[in-house]
Image (spheres, rainbow, N blue to C red):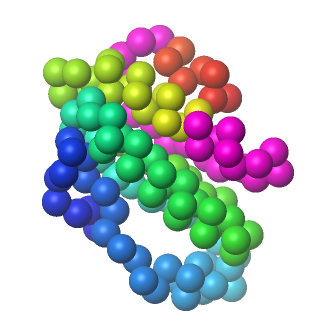
Amino acid sequence: GLADEANGVQMMKPMPDLDHLLERAVGKGIFGTKMRSVINAANQEGIAAIVAQQFDVGRQILGHGLMPIIEPEVTITIADKAEAEDILLAEITKQLDALGEDKRVMLKLSLPTKANQYKSLV
């Protein structure tokens, strides 16, 4: 689930049983799992926190041999959507650069305002 909005975002609630669930997923031959959080404003602090949380959970998922699907959803109706997407791109890039060449994640991103906004992430 999602936490209440703070700093223009809704982060994921804590998942204390995630390791157990990931072990079950591995046992059932699951490929991966996604994490969803929501960006409601172009707030640098909030977007940085969401992306950091997504990648922290992603590393936990990778630790079980599963594919993390990173999903920081930008609300398509916000007035500062393009600015939020610029911040999101910068934060995702930082996290990917720190992830390590041997680690892979999937990104599930909202359609951007600017064409090819996320092309550099491919």
Residue in the foreground of this view, choosing between 103 and 46: 46
> Magenta region's main secondary structure?
loop
> In this view, which residue lies farthest toward the top?
115
Asked if the stretch drawn in magenta spans residue 99, the answer is yes
Residue at coordinates 42% horizontally, 83% vertically from top-left? 16
Residue in the foreground of this view, choosing between 9 and 94: 94
> In this view, which residue lies farthest toward the right?
102
In the shown orientation, is residue 60 left or right of residue 80?
right
Residue at coordinates 68% horizontally, 39% vertically from top-left? 97
In the shown orientation, is residue 96 left or right of residue 65?
left
Q: Is residue 43 above or below residue 18?
A: above
Residue 53 location (% of width, % of height): 45, 57
Q: Is residue 94 above or below residue 62?
A: above
Residue in the foreground of this view, choosing between 65 and 13: 13
Asked if the stretch drawn in magenta spans residue 18, the answer is no
In the shown orientation, is residue 19 left or right of residue 87?
right
Q: Quadrant of the C terminus?
A: top right
Residue 75 appearing in the image: no
Residue at coordinates 16% horizontally, 60% vertically from top-left? 4
In the shown orientation, is residue 51 left or right of residue 24?
left
Q: Magenta stretch?
A: 94-115
Residue at coordinates 39% horizontally, 54% vertically from top-left? 36
Residue 2 location (% of width, % of height): 26, 62
Q: Is residue 36 above or below residue 93?
A: below
